[in-house]
Amino acid sequence: MPSSGTNMSKEDDTIFALRTTANREDQVMDFVASNAQKKKIEVYSVIRPHGMRGYIFIEAATKTDAEQAAFNIPYARGILAHPVKYSEIEHMLEQVKHEMNIQKSDIVEIISGPFKRENAKVTRIDKTKEEVVVELLEAAVPIPITVKMDAVKVVRRETDTPETKKEEDSGEEEGL
């Protein structure tokens, strides 16, 4: 029974954090990957989590392999002393797509950027680019502004569309 526990931790002990100069993570990744190929080092993957600056993760057979892959690489600052468990970085690697329920004519609040806390009306939605085109409600002249879908939240849904109001009006006229 204790051996299975050590096997599990042994599998988790293959990911090592490499400290890098901020905003140079991509260059270090390329250097590490090419270095590992040239020297035929057992490096399985090199990972740069989105939004994490100054670190990349190297999955290798041993810490020595990770250190050899990062040896003499510009902008690499060194491998951290302890290996990283997969469970600690899992949330950074797997991005979950949240289905946004935004419709045309919705009233939204912009939650980031220069128009933060402004209310706007959705005029167009581009789901492929994950962008919405909105017009500010308080603006004197309606100017279309394109923002990312995650930069807005729905405040009020327009349930009464002009078509339904016209049908109600025409139904009342026929009754007279």
Image: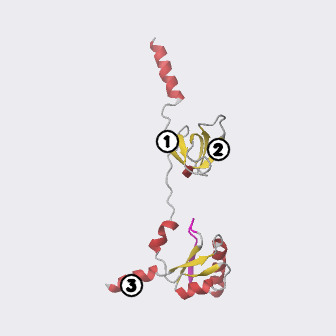
- Pointers 2 and 1 in contact (C-beta within 8 Å): no
**Of discs 3 and 1, which sits in the foreground?**
1
Instruction: Write down the residue under mark 1.
Output: 155
Asked if residue 160 lies left or right of residue 4, the reply is right
Does 65 appear in magenta? no
Location of the N terminus (image quadrant): bottom left
Q: Secondary structure at mark 2?
A: strand
Query: Residue at position x 63%, y 86% from top?
Result: 71
Query: At label 2, which amino acid type do we have?
Result: Ile
Residue for badge 3:
6
Chain part drawn in magenta? 42-52
Comes first in the chain, label 3 or label 2: 3
Residue bearing mark 2: 145
Q: Nearer the viewer, mark 3 or mark 2?
A: 2
Identify whether 169 is placed above or below 67. Answer: above
Tell me the CA gap for discs 3 and 1: 51 Å
